[in-house]
Amino acid sequence: MKQITSLGQRSIVMLSALVLLALITSALYLLDQYAAKVDAISAAEQRRVESLKLADLLRQTSDDLTRMARTYVVTGESRYEEYFKQILAIRKGEMPRPVNYGDVYWDYVVSTGRKPREDGPPVSLEEIMRQQGFSSEEFNLLNQARQKSDKLALLEVRAMYVVKGYALDSSGKYVETGKPDFELAQRLLHGKEYHAEKLRIMELIDRVARAVDTRTQEEIEYLETEAGRLATLSLTLGTGGFIFVLLLLVLAVRRINNDNEHGSDIQSRRVYRSSISRTSKFVTAGVSVVIVAVLFVIFLTPDSREFQGLDISPHDNVIGITDNEILLGSSAALTGHAGFLGTQYTRGALSWFSQVNAAGGIHGRKIRLISYDDQYDPPQTVENTEKLIGVDKVFMLFGYVGTPTSVKIIDAVHEHQVPAFGFLSGAEPLRTPFRPYMFHVRASYYEEVEGALTYFVDELGLSNIAVVYQDDAFGNAVLSGVQLAAWRRQQKSNRDLEIVATDTYTRGTMDVEPALESLKNSGAEAVIMAGTYDPLARFIKLSVDNSFTPYFHTVSFIGSGAFAEAIKRNEVATQHYEKIIVTQVVPSPSSADIEVVDQYRTLHSRYFPDDLPNYVALEGFVNAQVLVEALKRAGPDLTRTQLINTLEEMKNEDIGLGKKLTFGKFDHSGLSGVYYSRLDDGSGKFEVFGLDE
């Protein structure tokens, strides 16, 4: 009998120890996660403060420059001109940055003539901004503000030269006139143009501050929610474990009492069988509790934003699907100054959709694409998207064209949980932060610009780069890519690489002359351009007419066919063609040895016989092929969730391009790598070339 009692006691003790060990381990893990969240909250609050301080520092340096220029114009004291130069040099990283460089630094210097604190290492304001971890949107806004402030500084420099008796000549150089013009200097620094430019800078800085405040507040609130959830989970698990162990101890006490009360052999055997039965049940229950507890900790404690699954309602999951149709929706520039892009991208996709439909569709369903014209106008894109989702009830969005238009639908895509696939844009805000409903086949603009600098800097050995871009989200995305690619090279090899000038023009206009004035005397050996084909062709024409003949580059969004025609219309001399470069995300539509190109040329000529082969239509064709393959694999019981899961499972797919396409759970960019093309003076088309050519 004692052996039986001992067996039951050992079983209960072992079970209690096992459960207790599991609960202690789980509780410690939860506490560690909780402490990490608390630390993250503190770090997020610190980042918020530092980010807002940095935005304000840009405002402060702009005000300091204004103050020194105006004081110099009034007093003529050379020290204010010197302070002005030092402020610019510190901002550019050309002089050591004072420690705790802030509001009162220059007040102290002006008043006492001494520095209030020691200098730190030289570091540019742009680099500090990059290290701070701003979002792409915030960084772009800050960069715009800094660039506009740099541009305003040129006006301030002009005012200081005027009071010294200098004036700008036709070549943009200062020449001595011997006649100080105090009245002109005052007008330059106090006129309407000056105040308007100052307002634009401050508006951008204010937008950054509001964006940072919103983003960091959301981050802090999320972390606080997560910390509270972990604390509740830990308390619940601990309480449940304590109760379970207490019940096991009560059972052990009762077992001992029962064993003392019964001693015959028959009773012992009955007690033994009953003991084994009860012990088995409790062992099973205990092991189940341990498993549930461990799973509870594993699956509920990670960052819920990162690991949560899609939560599309059953009704929304099948919107746009009938027994015989899959309904897609698109908004693109079908007319207007970007009309070639939208028209050709859509027709390229329709070439493949038409072929699939002619063969019976996908699991008995044919694809129907509703396509609205937005004329490359963001508000119209939003209106079209609302109609596609709310009125037309499409299954998914497909084939949006352009960055400033596409970024405006991000909120709608996520609010309505609508898959969006195949953008004619490589902008980072469409990819970062991770967008669970948005998929991209093409390489990003960052990759294209990296490829451009690989050619210009690493292959040709150029060191002076300039950027001209349309003043919107697309232009800023390309500018950020150039800055990032240049910074990487500067950090890696200390190459004497410099972005010598940047300037903008207004989207939808041909007003590129001011940008040319900023760039033509900059010494730029290559100009990275971001815009549509007509204004960029005009920029090249005006540049070469003014004897400014660097390499010209733009990204694939340009639409190479339309760009080539615009260059010819502007009568750019063919001797300059070889220096006009476009990076591409698909191979040449003239390639004879690539499977997907052969398919494209055959089908596009069948369904759109009046169109010439072009890069944009080929890209639309490739996107349509990838989507159709995913729809097929998703099976006959198609839902939005099933499509997304199917796309995320596509790995190392050969799509006939000679490159493998891969999506992932947290990677919705399918292809990487770029092709190089230059304008051929024989064919008048952009032809692909290799770096060794």
Image (cartoon, grey):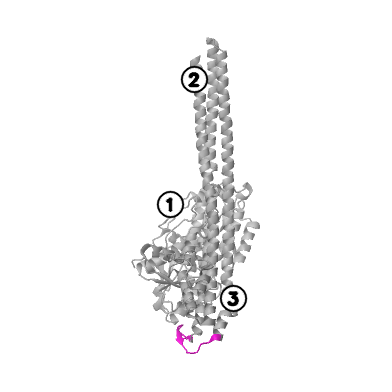
Give the alpha-carbon distance from disc 2 to disc 1, as whole Å: 57 Å
| Residue 77 x/y as whole percent | 49, 81
| Residue 176: in magenta span | yes
Residue type at mark 2 is Leu
Disc with the residue nearer the chain's start (1 vs 3): 3
Closer-to-camera residue (605/557): 557
Residue 327 appears anywhere in the view: no
| Residue receiving disc 1 | 652
Closer-to-camera residue (320/202): 202
CB-based contact (under 8 Å), mark 2 and mark 3: no
| Closer mark to the observer between disc 2 and disc 1 | 2
Picture disc at residue 284:
none
- Judged from the image, the secondary structure of the residue bearing numbered disc 1 is loop
Which residue is at a point 50% across and 61% down the rendered structure image? 428
Kindly give the residue lying farthest to the front in the view shown. Answer: 112
Closer-to-camera residue (175/607): 175
Residue type at mark 1 is Asn
- Judged from the image, the secondary structure of the residue bearing numbered disc 2 is helix
Disc with the residue nearer the chain's start (2 vs 3): 2
Give the alpha-carbon distance from disc 1 to disc 3, as whole Å: 53 Å
The magenta span reads 166-182
| Residue receiving disc 3 | 196
| Residue receiving disc 2 | 7
Left or right of 541? Residue 389 is right
Disc with the residue nearer the chain's start (2 vs 1): 2
Split into 4 quadrants, where in the image is the C terminus?
A: bottom left
| Closer mark to the observer between disc 1 and disc 3 | 3
Label 1 neighbourhood size at 10 Å, few (<14), some (14-19), many (20+)? few
Quarter assignment of residue 176 = bottom left
256 in relation to 247, above or below = above
| Residue 412: in magenta span | no
Closer-to-camera residue (107/233): 107
